[in-house]
Every structure is written in structure tokens, then in C-alpha cells.
Image (tube, grey):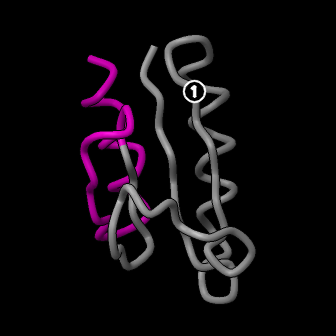
Amino acid sequence: MVHIEVFYNGNVDRETPDIVENIKYKFGKNVNVKLYDTNETAIPEKYGIINPPVVVIDGKKVIKLSGKDSLEEIVTKAIF
């Protein structure tokens, strides 16, 4: 199972929560996705300074998102 943390700015980004729900539905048991709005939740210090939207895979690899399609592409590559 791949553990994915998605950090986004809820004041600016309204699409990421819907995309994350689609990923949970599409990949089911293969992925554990947690969504964090950086306006409500502090970014863990272990990730350093990150500028949302960002995906963290298995607590190790930090990837900056470049568009709404890149989130699903990143998850697909991480699983397969």
C-alpha cells in the first residue's frame, strides 16, 4: 500500500479535495491518501518548507504539483 499525503491551500484550491476523493475511489485498497489544508493544519517539520500544492509519497518523496492532472498521474506511477 502506498501512503500519500496531499498538502493544498484551501483558500485558493477548490479542486484538490474532489481529485483526492476520485483517487480513493479509483485505487481503493492500493492507496492510503490523507488530505491536509495548510490553512487549517500545519505542515510537519520533517518535510521542511514546502509550498502547496505538494504530494508526499510514503513520507519520503516530496513532489510539487504542476496541475490538477499531475496528482492522479503521480499516484498512478507510485502504485505501479
Name the outermost residue toward the front.
Answer: 45
Name the outermost residue toward the bottom.
Answer: 12
Tell which of 40 and 9 is nearer to you: 40
Residue sitting at x 44%, y 70%: 53
**Magenta span includes 53:** no
Q: Is residue 70 left or right of residue 18?
A: left
Picture coordinates of residue 64, whole percent (x, y): 28, 65
**Vertical order, 78 against 68 (above or below):** above
Residue sitting at x 75%, y 74%: 40
**Magenta span includes 78:** yes
**Vertical order, 10 against 46 (above or below):** below
Q: Is residue 68 left or right of residue 20?
A: left
Mark 1 secondary-structure assignment: strand
Picture coordinates of residue 26, whole percent (x, y): 58, 25
Query: Badge 1: few (under 14), some or many (20 or more) residues near its Cα, within 10 Å?
Result: some
**In the rendered image, which quarter is residue 46 located in?**
bottom left
**Vertical order, 74 against 3 (above or below):** below
Residue sitting at x 69%, y 88%: 11
Picture coordinates of residue 59, whole percent (x, y): 38, 39
**In the rendered image, which quarter is residue 14 located in?**
bottom right
Tell which of 29 and 37 is nearer to you: 37
Q: Is residue 23 left or right of residue 58?
A: right
Region in magenta: 57-80
Q: Is residue 18 left or right of residue 32?
A: right
Residue sitting at x 26%, y 17%: 80
Residue highlighted by disc 1: 32
Kind of residue at disc 1: Asn
**Vertical order, 1 against 18 (above or below):** above
Picture coordinates of residue 33, whole percent (x, y): 58, 36
